[in-house]
Image (cartoon, coloured by chain):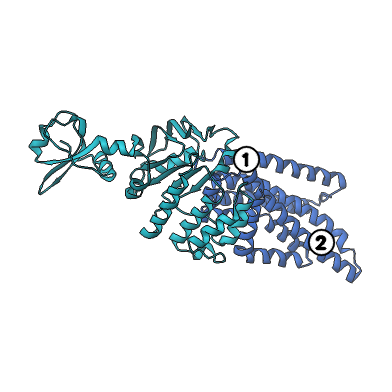
């Protein structure tokens, strides 16, 4: 079963359009939604949580159409962390517990306390006095303390230092050990997604360029270095996206199966795949 | 809805202390104008609460959580009703004590004033809430203030002209008051339905 299924999702604004986005997230896996600022990641997340009206398309979350009244019950099984924690600034962690206890049917106070201790979060300090990292940790603690089946994370690790980020990525990794637990995670820290995700979806200027298994992406693409002339002699369609020009030559991303015998492609990172596909200038 | 009301309680007791103290202060003064002011002022509690929600972006988070639009909207109305009720109860208590101490009939005259003020406050709440929800606090508050001054300015002008023309002042008989009270309830029911619709169809 798919934890998430988006089909033909479209949303038009005056200066931006999310155009016909379709992808799915199989249960038990982690999907990373990558894209530059303004690519449509947050819009996609808002649409899948049905907090803004769409122009067209279908969204199913944990098997339920997100426009039906049943979706409010499904939200009990979803933990959401946005790019900011968004709790009222006068609340403290103890009061957040009281509010969430009345919000989520499966709220687990013991679990919440454990996360507060693990993240070194004070329970009586007002939220406005928290650092950005502490705020995000509190939001993550809340999202994890009601036994969700799906985590929706919108730039959730953005305000964290590398050590805290690593710790939290481990928690997310543990979370998906259960087969019915899934994560949709948007970020532009590609290294986080590369470390964690099973699937990568790349949004560019409102369009979904691909949604693929991470390992398959790494098998499909490679890096080739050479002169401009050498790269121009590669078979048509071998070079994907733009090229990187430096004093030492030209670097291009290629489809490994389009390369002629004798031309070897080096390993490429997910970050490079995104960068090459996103570059408009410097094309062969 | 209890979660949202508890959150609002935490916010208003911490962030709006001065607002609450002013309401209590005005309602404790045994004076008709102050009482009317305290009760009307209390009806504006949801405006400030919604402004704080917007500032902390809680209004964005709340849409992601398992709260129905009905719960989110009703929690703001209930907050207004509680505020108005508490201000009215304080005013009534103070006036009752004054009546007993001074052996006057201040409480009898006062009853009509309080009930009329409650109706006025609830009508304000019914007008303001859909505006705040559909336009956001900043624009909604501006439009509400314009409507507030137009309505009360027109009423003031009407009573001024009536007095000048030596017309009989409209008296609040039980029947008239019953009609006003029923209209107030109807206005609130319609307002809640509109607010839920606006909340569900808000564009961002």
Q: Distance between the residues labelled 1 and 2?
A: 33 Å
Q: Can you tell which of label 1 and label 2 is closer to the viewer?
A: 1
Question: Could you say which chain is coloured cyan in the image?
Answer: A
Residue A81: image location, x then y, percent: 48, 49
Residue at (66% x, 53% y) in the render: B5
| Viewer-side residue, A278 vs A18 | A278
A126 horizontally vs B33: left or right = left
Residue A70: image location, x then y, percent: 60, 35
Q: Is residue A6 above or below residue A31?
A: above
Identify the hue of chain B: blue
Residue B167: image location, x then y, percent: 81, 49
- Is residue A135 in view? yes
Query: What residue is pinned by disc 2?
Result: B92
Q: Quick one: label 1 or label 2, which is nearer the N terminus?
A: 2
Disc sitting over residue A17 in the figure? none
Q: SS for tag 1?
A: helix
Crowding at dot 2, Cα within 10 Å, few <14 / some 14-19 / many 20+, comes out as: many
Query: What residue is pinned by disc 1?
Result: B196
């Amino acid at each position: 079963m798919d934890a998430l299924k988006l089909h033909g999702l479209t949303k038009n604004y005056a200066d931006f359009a999310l155009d016909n986005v379709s992808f799915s997230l199989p249960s038990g896996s982690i999907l990373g939604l990558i894209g530059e600022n303004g690519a449509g990641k947050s819009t996609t997340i808002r649409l899948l949580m049905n907090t803004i009206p769409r122009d067209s398309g279908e969204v199913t979350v944990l098997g339920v159409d997100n426009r039906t009244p049943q979706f409010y019950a499904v939200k009990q099984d979803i933990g959401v962390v946005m790019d900011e924690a968004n709790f009222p600034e006068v609340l403290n962690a103890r009061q957040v517990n009281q509010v969430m206890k009345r919000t989520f049917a499966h709220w687990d106070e013991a679990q919440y306390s454990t996360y507060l201790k693990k993240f070194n979060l004070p329970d009586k300090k007002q939220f406005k006095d928290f650092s950005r990292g502490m705020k995000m940790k509190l939001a993550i603690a809340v999202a994890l303390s009601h036994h969700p089946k799906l985590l929706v994370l919108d730039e959730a690790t953005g305000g964290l230092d590398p050590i805290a980020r690593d710790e939290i990525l481990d928690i997310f990794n543990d979370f998906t050990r259960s087969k019915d637990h899934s994560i949709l995670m948007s970020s532009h820290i590609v290294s986080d997604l590369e470390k964690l995700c099973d699937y990568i979806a790349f949004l560019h200027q409102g369009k979904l360029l691909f949604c693929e298994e991470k390992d398959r992406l790494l098998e499909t693409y490679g890096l080739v270095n050479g002169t401009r002339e050498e790269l121009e002699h590669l078979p048509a369609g071998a070079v994907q996206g733009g090229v990187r020009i430096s004093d030492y030559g030209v670097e291009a991303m290629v489809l490994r199966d389009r390369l002629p015998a004798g031309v070897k492609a080096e390993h490429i990172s997910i970050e490079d795949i995104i960068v090459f596909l996103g570059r408009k200038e410097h094309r062969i | 809805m209890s979660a949202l009301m508890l959150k609002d309680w935490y916010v208003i007791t911490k962030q709006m202390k001065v607002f609450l103290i002013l309401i209590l202060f005005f309602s404790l003064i045994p004076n008709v104008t102050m009482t009317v002011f305290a009760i009307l002022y209390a009806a504006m509690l949801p405006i400030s609460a919604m402004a704080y929600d917007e500032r902390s972006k809680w209004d964005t988070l709340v849409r992601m959580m398992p709260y129905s639009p009905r719960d989110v909207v009703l929690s703001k109305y209930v907050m207004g009703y509680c505020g108005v009720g508490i201000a009215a109860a304080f005013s009534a208590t103070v006036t009752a004590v004054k009546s007993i101490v001074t052996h006057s009939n201040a409480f009898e005259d006062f009853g009509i004033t309080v009930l009329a003020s409650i109706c006025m406050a609830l009508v304000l709440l019914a007008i303001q809430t859909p505006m705040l929800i559909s336009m956001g606090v900043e624009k909604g508050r501006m439009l509400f203030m314009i409507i507030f001054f137009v309505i009360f300015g027109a009423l003031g002008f009407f009573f001024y002209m009536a007095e000048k023309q030596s017309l009989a002042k409209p008296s609040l008989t039980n029947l008239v008051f019953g009609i006003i009270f029923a209209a107030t309830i109807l206005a609130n029911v319609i307002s809640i339905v509109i607010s839920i619709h606006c909340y569900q169809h808000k564009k961002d």
